[in-house]
Image (tube, rainbow, N blue to C red):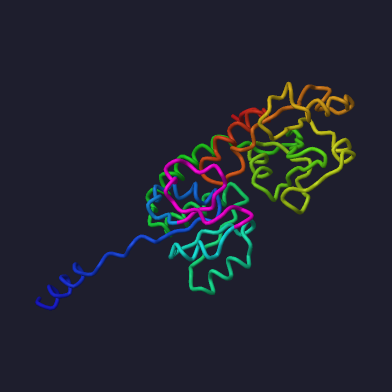
Amino acid sequence: MRAGWLAGLLLFCLPLAAAPRVVSLAPFLTDMVVQLDAVDQLVGVLDDGQLPLELESVPRIGSHQSMSRELILAQNPDLVLAWTSGNPPELLDTLETWGIRVERFDPQRLADITQMTRRLGVLLERSEAAETLLNGYEQKLQGLHRPVTNNAPRVFVQLWDEPLYTVSDNQLIGDALRHCGARNVFADLPIYAPQVGLESVLAADPDLILVLDDQPAAEHPWVRRWRQFPQMRAVREGQLKVMNGDSLVRPTPQIVSGVQALCALVGVPETH
């Protein structure tokens, strides 16, 4: 009886584990910390020029081209959230040799966002918030899903012009396109954002050309350039569309709004 009472008293007197001091090395990971309501844990962020006002007082540890190991170390972090394919591996290795815990993330599929959100929920002690985010995300995704049929529209996604860059299905935008029930004409290329030739696009003859940019389609110079090739199905049938790609590049649960816009542009009918 006395031993049990004493053990309980000692447990009560032990200090609670402090929330981790977190440095985020990628904009999408910073977004995730905000969405999980864990801003109070941030002691350093990468500055991409688009940080929300609520992070105004959080120290910057550099930009994409100039991350500072010294500035990261100066924040005395317990945890660094890193982007596997976007952060220099030698920097992450160095941080680990200094005894700093580095957790790497590289979501390239819609399903990866679910896994990342749950993992961050555990790391940041925000598991309940993570599940709340995921409930809405997964329900909306399920409602948008369409099977890829033999008659699915064939789409060319244009990221840039001269030279032409597109996406493969190894990348998040390609995965979202497939989720909408469409076919990416360059799905099988091995890298995330491959460069392709004009002749390859003409040969693929897509049903739809989707330009990812923020200019209106009627005035867009890339769209005007495609109109020089009336032999293409997409041009002949007026299927030259523009979408602001910003909503599809940050892999957080909020991407579902971009997937919804993408599905609407692709125009695959609902299944019954």
**Image quarter of the C terminus:** top right
Please report the bounds of the magenta region as a residue range. 44-66
Image coords of residue 138 (percent x, y)? 50, 42
Farthest residue, direction left: 2
Instruction: Decide whether residue 111 is among the magenta residues.
Output: no
Image coords of residue 222 (percent x, y)? 78, 30
The residue that appears at 12% across and 73% down in the rendered structure is 5
Q: Quadrant of residue 174?
A: top right
Image coords of residue 192 (percent x, y)? 72, 50
Q: Quadrant of residue 215?
A: top right
Front residue of 260 and 229: 229
The residue that appears at 37% across and 50% down in the rendered structure is 128
* Image side of residue 8 versus residue 70, left or right: left
**Main SS of residues in magenta:** loop
Image coords of residue 259 (percent x, y)? 59, 36
The residue that appears at 50% across and 44% down in the rendered structure is 51
Residue 11, placed above or below residue 150: below
